[in-house]
Amino acid sequence: MQHLQADFGLSAADYLIMANLADAPHSRMRTYELIEATRWEKSRLSHHLKRMERRRLVRRVPTDKLRSPAFMLTEDGEQVIAEAAPAHADRIRQLFFDAVDEEFLGRFVEMCETVLARIDRHGMGDIAPPGQSTVD
């Protein structure tokens, strides 16, 4: 992920938050949704979002609940992620998928599917932090 820092001034944490916001409806997520998406503790997310606000990548937006603010990408943030995401996807393709042949990739996909099926059979497909429910 060093290329994100060198080419776009983004840390891996910045990219994770921005990619989640970019994929969200209206490019907006409440804090608790970002906590679930990143699996970070509330204090870590809060501190990181403040740093990103100072860099004008994200901004806080009002919601109907005072204790649950939402965040969205700023215009600068939208531009940065629009440039960084394709470059990052290309880098992943080069480093991982271009490095292996189709036979290896096929076996890898089978192994991943086997592990995911086992996780599903054991009811662990959506593991919540202690004290939180996975039921919607």
Image (cartoon, grey):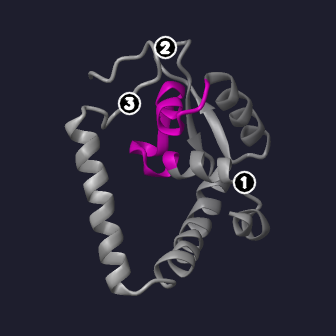
Identity, as a three-letter code, of the amino acid under mark 3: Ile
Number of dots carrying numbers: 3
Q: Is residue 91 left or right of residue 51?
A: left
Residue 31 highlighted magenta (yes or no): yes
Residue 36 highlighted magenta (yes or no): yes
Residue at 31 percent across and 51 percent down: it is: 115
Mark carried by residue 49: none
Mark 1 closeness class: few <14, some 14–19, many ≥20 residues within 10 Å: some
> Which residue occupies the foreground of this view, 84 or 104?
104
Residue that mark 2 sits on: 65
* Magenta region, residue range: 20-41
**Cα gap from disc 2 to disc 3, whole angstroms:** 26 Å
Q: Is residue 79 left or right of residue 47?
A: left
Residue that mark 1 sits on: 11
Residue that mark 3 sits on: 127
Residue at 55 percent across and 65 percent down: it is: 85
N-terminal-most mark, 1 or 3: 1
Q: Magenta stretch mostly in which secondary structure?
A: helix
Identity, as a three-letter code, of the amino acid under mark 2: Lys
Viewer-side label of 2, 3? 3
Circle 1 SS class:
loop
Residue at 56 percent across and 12 percent down: it is: 67
Residue at 26 percent across and 58 percent down: it is: 113
Q: From the image, which quarter does the C terminus lie in?
A: top left
Rendered view: 72 above or below 96: above
Q: From the image, which quarter does the N terminus lie in?
A: bottom right
**Cα gap from disc 1 to disc 3, whole angstroms:** 26 Å
Q: What x and y, as percent, mark residue 108?
A: 36, 69
**Cα gap from disc 2 to disc 1, whole angstroms:** 30 Å
Circle 3 SS class:
loop
Rendered view: 61 above or below 25: above
